Amino acid sequence: MHAEGLASMGDVGQAMGTAAVFGASGGIGHALCKALTGRGVTRLYAGSRSGSTPKGEGIVPFRFDYDRPDSLERAAATMANDPPRLVMVATGALSLPESAGPERSFKQIEADALERILRINTIGPALVAKHLLPLFPRNERAVFAALSARVGSISDNRIGGWHSYRASKAALNMLVRNFAIELGRTHPQAIAVSLHPGTVDTALSEPFQSNLPEGQLTDPREAARNLLNVVDGLAAADSGQQIDWRGERVPD
């Protein structure tokens, strides 16, 4: 679906009032925080594992750790009195620091690495949803958006490889679809989507930037603007989909 085909909902900051970003210390997460405060969000919960978050009026920093699920429960509890109507999960890992990079063959699959990537890319965001989705208002628009990747599409996979990353993002997309179905039964205006931001100039993509075609690498600030423009245009009918930075649906 193209961006012009999405139902326009106006500026996301003014519409949402309060928002939360998980992964605020990363390239895209940091840029999302800056963009949201610039769009008029009155309160922004900015969370990271390190505690490093943008500073500014209305920004409420918090720590969380996917290895400590109770930290997510505590974070949600601190938001309960003024819950976010926009939750963006901007965490993720393509490979681990101690590895040689994403697997190019099934012979390179290691149980510990696969489990770790799933923890970061799939289980963590699912636990964010577990604790934050119940805070959404029953009869008002609210959005849960988790950053995914086009390579998580099963039908669009033509070259294979990157087993842990692809599998973790495919699983994330399925979870988001499940969340959307469940939300639709009780929160008819709530939206759950996974978003593909494109190839963004961050630490995650840095090892693979040398082979990119000219113009394919996006600055984090531009990526944040693109993603929030997509969120602006989301309607309930888009819930459960993976949508890219241009507003187009990514094949399942």
Image (cartoon, grey):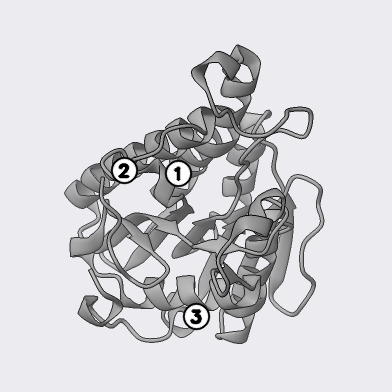
Amino acid type at mark 3: Gly
Give SS at disc 3. helix
Residue found 53% across the figure and 71% down from its top: 18
The picture quadrant where one finds residue 117 is: top right
Give how far apart the Cα atoms at labels 3 and 2 are.
23 Å
Foreground: 225 or 151?
Answer: 151
- Name which residue type carries label 1: Ala
Going from N to C along the chain, the mark reached first, 1 or 2, is 1
Quadrant containing the C terminus is top left
Amino acid type for the residue under numbered disc 2: Phe
Query: Residue 106: x percent and y percent?
Result: 50, 18
Residue contact between numbered discs 1 and 2, judged by CB atoms under 8 Å: yes
User: Which mark is on residue 179?
Assistant: 2
- Direction from residue 132 to residue 28 in the image, left or right: right
Q: Secondary structure at mark 2?
A: helix
- The Cα–Cα distance between marks 3 and 1, rounded to whole angstroms, is 21 Å
Q: Is residue 81 visible?
A: yes
Name the mark on residue 13.
Answer: 3
Q: Percent position (x, y) of residue 219?
A: 64, 73
Q: Point out residue 241 in the picture as x, y percentages from the top left corner.
A: 28, 54
